[in-house]
Amino acid sequence: MRHFLDIHNIDAGDLRGILDQAKAMKDARAGRPRGAEDDARALAGRMVALLFEKPSTRTRVSFDVGTRQLGGRTLILSGSEIHLGHGETIADTARVLSRYVDLVMIRTFEEESLLELARHATVPVINGLTNRTHPCQVMADMMTFEEHRGPIAGKKVVWVGDGNNVCASFLHAAGQFGFEMVVTGPEDLHPEAEFVELARARGASVDLHSDPVKAVTGADLVVADTWVSMHDSPAIKESRRQQLEPYQVNAELMARAKPNALFMHCLPAHRGEEATDEVMDGPHSVIFDEAENRLHVQKALMRWCLDV
Ligand code: CP
């Protein structure tokens, strides 16, 4: 049984195979209606549970549509609707769900909730985001970069802003896909040392800079994300905005990157804060390709988990 919990603990050859299959499935259904099933109904007869303790547009819709395109069915549940960590242990929920469904995707707050679910489930579990990592997003971003620019190995990827959960998964990916990673932001918002050290231990070059101009110079890919989380207090939101203002990705900063550099943002965005409309909608931006590729890469992830 294969869980997809984080990028760093999956075999690099398997990660490459997942990206190849995602691209093949995307190409095979080009021009077909979104609701049409794929020829290979790889999840026929399978039931997939999608658990959400946090809001979601892309993860929720892409997993649901992707499962249906593969001929499977979904059950979408919010944390408040079931006894997930309240009313019964996560371990018991994992054991029970495993009697009803073939695969579980969970978006949760604490990484430990994901890990406990995976430890006790007897069906595969996919990490749909925790406070620490967001591996499905970064797999879609790897696919998106390579569709536009070819292999990401050896390229310079610059993360601008808060060293958050998506940044952590980029660091995991740096070690697996072999790209250079630069993170620029205030020192107290740099990613956890564990993620940086792991990437370096896998041979990736990782630099942490407080100067965004120096960091972005010569970048092949510039990535931004929201500065605040929906659960932050108004006081934290305001102080974060002030602290991160120098790290806004605008046309001037983007001009420091290579002329053919790409810009990514996993969305949802606070337009005019972490990135301007000019960049979000400009010629470097591939933000909606990233969103689309969530669908294709997660279909391949589910097939990998179930070996179908
Ligand atoms: N990027 C991402 O995970 O989007 P959602 O929060 O809408 O799922």
Image: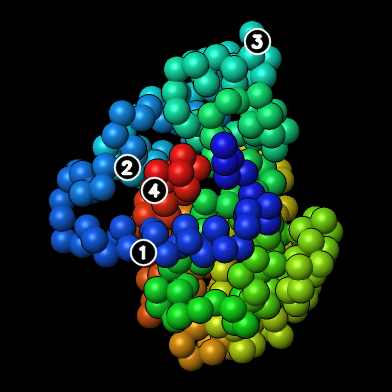
Distance from disc 4 to disc 1, alpha carbons, whole Å, reads: 10 Å
Question: Which residue matches tag 2?
Answer: 42
96 in relation to 225, above or below: above
Kindly identify the residue that appears in the image at 26 percent across and 37 percent down.
71
Q: Secondary structure at mark 4?
A: helix
Residue type, numbered disc 1? Lys
Quadrant hosting residue 67:
top left
The amino acid sitting under disc 3 is: Glu
Q: Which residue is mark 4?
A: 299
Q: Residues within 10 Å of mark 1 (few under 14, many from 20)?
A: some
Tag 2, which secondary structure?
loop
List the residue tagged with mark 1: 23
Q: How is the image coloured?
A: rainbow
In front: label 2 or label 1: 2
Q: In whole angstroms, how far apart are the C-alphas of marks 2 and 1? A: 16 Å
Q: Say what amino acid the circle numbered 2 marks.
A: Ala
Please name the residue shown 43% across and 68% down the image. Answer: 144
Residue at image point 81% right, 67% down: 201
Asked if the beta carbon under badge 3 is closer than 8 A to the nearest atom of ligand 1, the reply is no
Q: Which residue is mark 3?
A: 88
Q: Is residue 141 visible?
A: no
* The CB of the residue at mark 2 lies under 8 Å from ligand 1: no
Mark 1, secondary structure of its residue? helix
SS class of the residue under badge 3? Answer: loop
Residues packed near mark 4 inside 10 Å, few (<14), some (14 to 19) or many (20 plus): many
Closer to the chain start, of discs 1 and 3, is: 1
Q: CA distance from mark 2 to mark 4?
A: 9 Å
Q: Nearer the viewer, mark 2 or mark 3?
A: 2
Q: Is residue 58 left or right of residue 123?
A: left
